[in-house]
């Protein structure tokens, strides 16, 4: 009974701290504790939260971790792992709402933020295409390639096919480098050049190609590669 009272008191103090001081006043593991309260209602979740942060690095790493890896942490069941995956889904949805249907040129920082939320913690490479209308508003985001830690297959003609199906007038390419280095590879550069050439006869503009790494982002346009 004493342990239960202690846990309940601790949980209430964390909730009050969040309400009064906001999320910035809490450590990552404390925020994770608050989230875990609903998934594990009758157990001290502080050790679990700390173990998760230690294992995966930060909150983003925890949210992006595969279910099969999450359940290897003591105290994390498949149900709890599913709850943790909800963090990632909510984060991506909230970030996407900041850019969908808006001109990306005037909301560029929000667009980069959305791409980073979706990809900076991914453990394998993804190739995504952002499809824009004539007013450069985001109309769709599709994953057109998944691969290993350092390669995702990309087919330029498939990208153009999807752009025509979406009636898109412009594109932004996005892929991640799980290695942590956002520097575009020679393969990235050659593929982007080929895709730009394939797009030209269809009057589809390739605005940029973003490479997302854990700590930074590279822009082909800023680097003078596009």
Image (cartoon, rainbow, N blue to C red):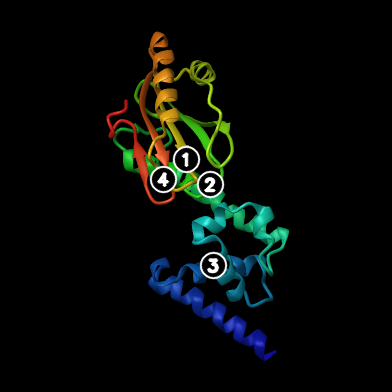
The numbered disc on residue 54 is: 3
Q: Is residue 26 left or right of residue 207?
A: right
Q: Is residue 64 above or below residue 159?
A: below
Name the element at disc 4: loop
- How far apart are labels 2 and 3 at the CA level? 17 Å
- Foreground pick, 35 / 225: 225
Q: Identify the residue shown where x is 72% and y is 63%.
A: 77
Give how far across and how far down residue 120 sits, in percent: 46, 47
* Disc 2 and disc 3 in contact, CB within 8 angstroms: no
Q: Earlier in the sequence, mark 2 or mark 3?
A: 3
Q: Is residue 148 above or below residue 168?
A: below
Q: Earlier in the sequence, mark 3 or mark 1?
A: 3
Q: Earlier in the sequence, mark 4 or mark 1?
A: 1
Q: Is residue 204 above or below residue 120?
A: above
* Disc 4 and disc 3 in contact, CB within 8 angstroms: no
Q: Residue furthest front?
A: 186
Give how far across and how far down residue 170 sits, in percent: 39, 22
Q: Evaluate whether residue 127 shows in this view.
A: yes
Name the element at disc 3: helix
Give how far across and how far down residue 119 sits, in percent: 49, 44
- Foreground pick, 50 / 178: 178
Give the quarter of the image for residue 208.
top left
Instruction: Mark 3: give few (<14), some (14-19) or many (20+) Cα within 10 Å.
Output: few
Q: Earlier in the sequence, mark 4 or mark 3?
A: 3
The numbered disc on residue 181 is: 4
């Amino acid at each position: 009974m004493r342990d239960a009272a202690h846990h309940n008191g601790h949980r209430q103090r964390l909730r009050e701290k969040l309400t009064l001081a906001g999320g910035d006043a809490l450590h990552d593991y404390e925020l994770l504790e608050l989230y875990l309260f609903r998934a594990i209602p009758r157990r001290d979740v502080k050790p679990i939260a700390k173990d998760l942060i230690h294992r995966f690095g930060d909150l983003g790493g925890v949210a992006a971790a595969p279910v099969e890896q999450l359940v290897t942490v003591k105290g994390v069941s498949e149900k709890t792992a599913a709850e943790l995956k909800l963090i990632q889904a909510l984060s991506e949805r909230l970030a996407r709402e900041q850019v969908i249907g808006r001109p990306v040129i005037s909301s560029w920082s929000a667009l980069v933020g959305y791409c980073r939320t979706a990809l900076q913690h991914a453990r394998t490479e993804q190739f995504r295409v952002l499809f824009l209308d004539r007013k450069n508003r985001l109309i769709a985001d599709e994953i057109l390639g998944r691969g290993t830690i350092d390669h995702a297959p990309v087919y330029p003609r498939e990208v153009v096919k999807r752009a025509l199906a979406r009636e898109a007038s412009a594109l932004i390419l996005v892929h991640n480098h799980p290695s942590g280095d956002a520097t575009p590879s020679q393969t990235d550069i050659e593929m982007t050049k080929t895709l730009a050439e394939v797009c030209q006869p269809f009057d589809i503009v390739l605005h940029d190609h973003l490479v997302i790494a854990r700590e930074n982002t590279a822009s082909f346009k800023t680097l003078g590669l596009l």
